[in-house]
Amino acid sequence: MDRSNERIISNVSAWYDPGNKVKINGTLQNGGSMSVQLVTLWVTDATQKTYTSNSLTNYILKPGDVITYSDSTVPDGLYVDLPNLPDDELTCWYITARGNTIAAKSFTTTNIIQEGDQGDTTYADVASGIGLLGFNFKEFSKHDFGVSLPANHTLLPTFQKDYWLRQDHYTMFHAILTNYDPDKKDMVLNGSSVIYALIVQAGTVKFGFWPIVNVTGNAQTGLYVHPIGNNLDVQYILHYSTPVEVYFLGPYDPKNKVYSTPAVSSALTPLVYPLNIMAFGKLGTDDYGQNVPFVSLNVLS
């Protein structure tokens, strides 16, 4: 089942509570067409740079269901053990059994901040719910360049939204990524970032690589690849909570440092491969790395 069909409307508030706890009040409503199971509640304190989580039991919302957190109901997600002060900035989010993140905005423990309808964006969840990079599943797209690698400054044509890949063709992937760092630091993705496919076949691990590339221009003036073959100069800056369009081109042979086909060496085709974004760069002044599993493609010979 497509996990992007999960749609939870979150309207929560948080209060400072004596005894080194955070008190969560508000409602969660299932506004989608499928049941959703909540498995974990995470809370971070950006001021103290601490975080904690509660495992949730029997939190299944059928379509239209509403869960209310209040003093009268006192479910297991109402209080979270986390030392905090009255003016600390807190952020909370829920993790579903399908791996989606139900996000709430930052708030201080002395104020109520409400989080409205989350719309159609699905937030990628990794690292037990504390990953920082979100991926917009519905806006993923690609372009097949055929057997010829595009030259520098090539005008990019229209991208397609499908899940097929020719392993003997050069392909560019388009992804919309969002930085959800609770501390709201800028994230910088550099040329070490890559989309990769991985499969174990007959006891052998096989890879395919599509490194990150620079693209300039816009939808009105045209998008241009610029440049190819110098990935170390690639840099995408992701400001907090601001979606950024990011591009990857391959296949690429990291051993010989050249673009070359096939995408997955000696693999049997057709075969469905999971794709992952291996993001690397900086978060503020610190090194940053995260792996984001995001789509599967049927690879054709």
Image (tube, helix red, strand yellow):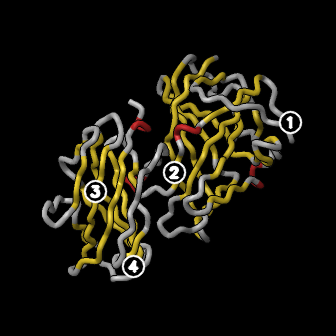
Q: Residue at x 51, y 30 (%)?
A: 296
On the rendered image, what quadrant is the N terminus found in? top left
Q: CA distance from mark 2 to mark 1?
A: 31 Å
First of labels 3, 2 by sequence position: 3
Quadrant location of residue 156? top right
Q: Position of residue 301 (x, y in %)?
A: 64, 17
Q: Are marks 1 and 3 in contact (CB under 8 Å)?
A: no
Q: Within 10 angstroms of label 1, few (less than 14), some, or many (20 or more) residues?
A: few
Q: CA distance from mark 4 to mark 3?
A: 22 Å
Q: Is residue 125 above or below residue 152?
A: below
Amino acid type assigned to the residue bearing label 1 in the image: Ala
Quadrant location of residue 76? bottom left
Residue situated in front as seen by the camera: 15 or 282? 15
Q: Residue at x 76, y 23 (%)?
A: 146
The residue singled out by tag 4 in the image is 88
Left or right of 214, for residue 290? left
Q: Residue at x 76, y 35 (%)?
A: 259
First of labels 4, 2 by sequence position: 4
The residue singled out by tag 1 in the image is 151
Amino acid type assigned to the residue bearing label 4 in the image: Asp
First of labels 4, 3 by sequence position: 3
Amino acid type assigned to the residue bearing label 3 in the image: Thr
Mark in front: 1 vs 3? 3
On residue 27, the disc is 3
Q: Is residue 292 above or below residue 163?
A: below
The answer to whether any part of residue 224 appears in the image is: no
